[in-house]
Amino acid sequence: MQFSIGVEYALHCLLYMVDIPSGKSVGIKDLATYQGVSETYLSKVYTKLRKSGIVKSIPGVNGGYALARSSENITFWDIVEAVEGNSPLFQCAEIRQNELLLDKNNLPDTHTKCPCLIKVVMLEAEDQMRQYLKNKTLGWLHEQVKNKIPEEHSKTTLEWFNNIKSR
């Protein structure tokens, strides 16, 4: 299992949007430039984030994107699900039904009436990951990063984003 690079792009770019003042927005080009990532790919990621209600599109010459809700109400799982979709990570094809030595007309109940134990374990693991990621928010991430990087870097980053429109 592997999440696409879009999840990382989304998390990093959304992190910088937390400090953007209310009523302001930031463009995809600027986010992509700041992060050094593909503008085209980031645009596709942000389309998914907008459709999921994580960001909102601000029209106009100085338009762009802004967070659609507070960072404390945006979970890592919200972002993963927006970018990756909501299909289960594990897909059970019930191959146990195809076992060569089983009489197809006389399968025991353990093969036909109960869920596949492998599927049960995999779905439980996925649920634990989902619950963990639902407990981590963009606001939590912002606080963690803010406490680990020099204040001067945070200040410079905020200034860079605030001065975008004047360039």
Image (spheres, helix red, strand yellow):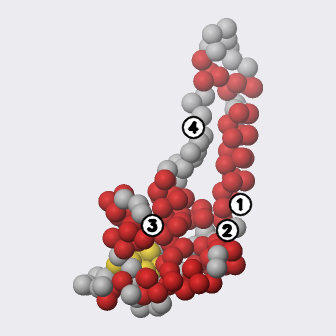
Please rate how many residues cluster around mark 1, counting C-alpha atoms within 10 Å: few if below 14, some from 14 to 19, many from 20: few
Residue 58 visible, this orientation: no
The residue beneath circle 3 is: 35
Question: Measuring 57% from the left and 80% from the top, which residue is drawn there?
Answer: 153
Percent coordinates x, y for residue 37 in the rendering: 41, 60
Instruction: Tell me the residue that label 1 is attached to.
Output: 132
Q: Nearer the viewer, residue 134 or 123?
A: 134
The local secondary structure at tag 2 comes to loop
Instruction: Mark 4 and mark 2 in contact? Answer it, CB < 8 Å.
Output: no
* Of labels 3 and 1, the one closer to you: 3
Q: Which residue is the site of mark 4?
A: 91
The picture places residue 142, in percent across and down from the top left corner, at 62, 76
Q: Mark 3 and mark 1: span between their CA atoms?
A: 27 Å
Instruction: Identify the amino acid type marked 3.
Output: Gln
Q: Of callouts 2 and 3, which one flags the residue occurring earlier in the amino acid sequence?
A: 3
Residue on which disc 2 sits: 136
Which residue shows up at 70% across the image and 67% down it?
Answer: 135
Q: Residues within 10 Å of mark 4 (few under 14, many from 20)?
A: few
- Would you identify the image quadrant in which residue 96 lies? top right
The residue type indicated by label 2 comes to Lys
